[in-house]
Amino acid sequence: MPTPLPLIETIDGQTVHRDILADLTAMQKAARSFGVDMSVASGFRSIERQTVIWNAKWQGLKPLYDTDGVELDFNALSTTQRVFAILNWSALPGASRHHWGTDVDVYDADAIKESGNSLQLIDKEYLPGGPCEGLYEFLKLHANDYGFSHVYTHGRGKIAEEKWHLSHLRTAHFYEQQTTLSNVQTLISSLDILGKSVVLDNLEPIFKDYIAPYLTH
Ligand SMILES: [Zn+2]
C-alpha cells in the first residue's frame, strides 16, 4: 500500500476505511428498521493477519474445503493443489480486499445470538431458514443504495460465493487499480508466507481466476 490507509472504527468496534463509514452506518440503520441487526464481523485485515491465516492453512492447522464447503483431505493434496484449496475460501496475503478497509463481512448479530451457535460465515447461515436469511434479503434489496455490492458471486472467478462479503466499490476502485499481477508478485516476494515458491510458480493462474475476475475496473 503506497500511503497509510485512513482507518476509522465502526460502531461494532471493527476498523474500516474512513470513506465507507457514513454509508455503512446508514445501511446498518436502515437494516435495523428492516428488522435486522447488521453487524460487521470483519472489516480491515492487515497483510500480517492474512499471512497468519494462510500459514495455518498451509500447515494443515485449519481445515481446507472445496467451493461447496466439503472438507478436503489435507494429506492427499499436492502442494499446488493445497494452494488452490486455500484460495477457495481465503485470499492470498497481499491480495485480500479486506486489506483496503473498503470491504466488510456482515452478519445478523441478534439472530446469531438467538440461534445459540457461533458465526461461521458459511452459505447456509444466509440461506432460507438460516439466522442471516433476513439480512441477506435486505442486502439484495438495499446494499446498492448505500454504495455496497456483493463481489464474490457465482460465475465471476473461482472463489466460492460469499453472501456476507460487501465492497464499497467507489472507495475500493483506487485499490483495485493498483492490484496488478506485477504488484502482487512484488508483494508476495516480500512476505514470509509458507509455500511462497509454489504460489509464485502459479501466480498467473491465481491472478487470472482468483483476483482479476473480482476487480471491477
Ligand atoms: Zn470478506
Image: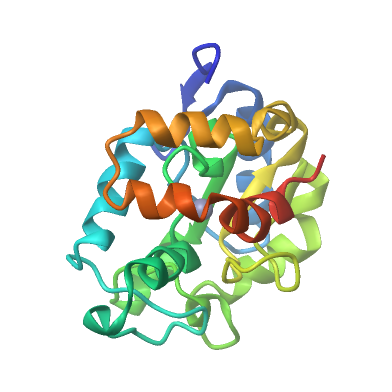
**Residue found at x 62% / y 69%:** 158
Question: Left of 179 or right of it: where is 117?
Answer: left
Give the image location of residue 173, x and y in percent.
Answer: 75, 32
Q: Residue at x 29, y 69 (%)?
A: 118
Residue 38 visible (yes or no): no
User: Does the rendering let one see residue 30?
Assistant: yes
- Residue at 49% of width from left, 29% of height from top? 186
Whether residue 20 is situated above or below residue 197 in the rendered picture = above
- Look at the picture and state if 68 lies above or below 173: below
Most foreground residue, 84 or 57: 84
x and y, in percent, of residue 126 in the image: 55, 75
**Horizontal arrangement in the rendering, residue 62 relative to residue 185 (left or right):** left
Q: Quadrant of residue 177?
A: top right
Q: Nearer the viewer, residue 185 or 43?
A: 185
In the rendered structure, the answer to whether residue 34 lies left or right of residue 114 reads: right
Q: Position of residue 7 (x, y in %)?
A: 49, 21
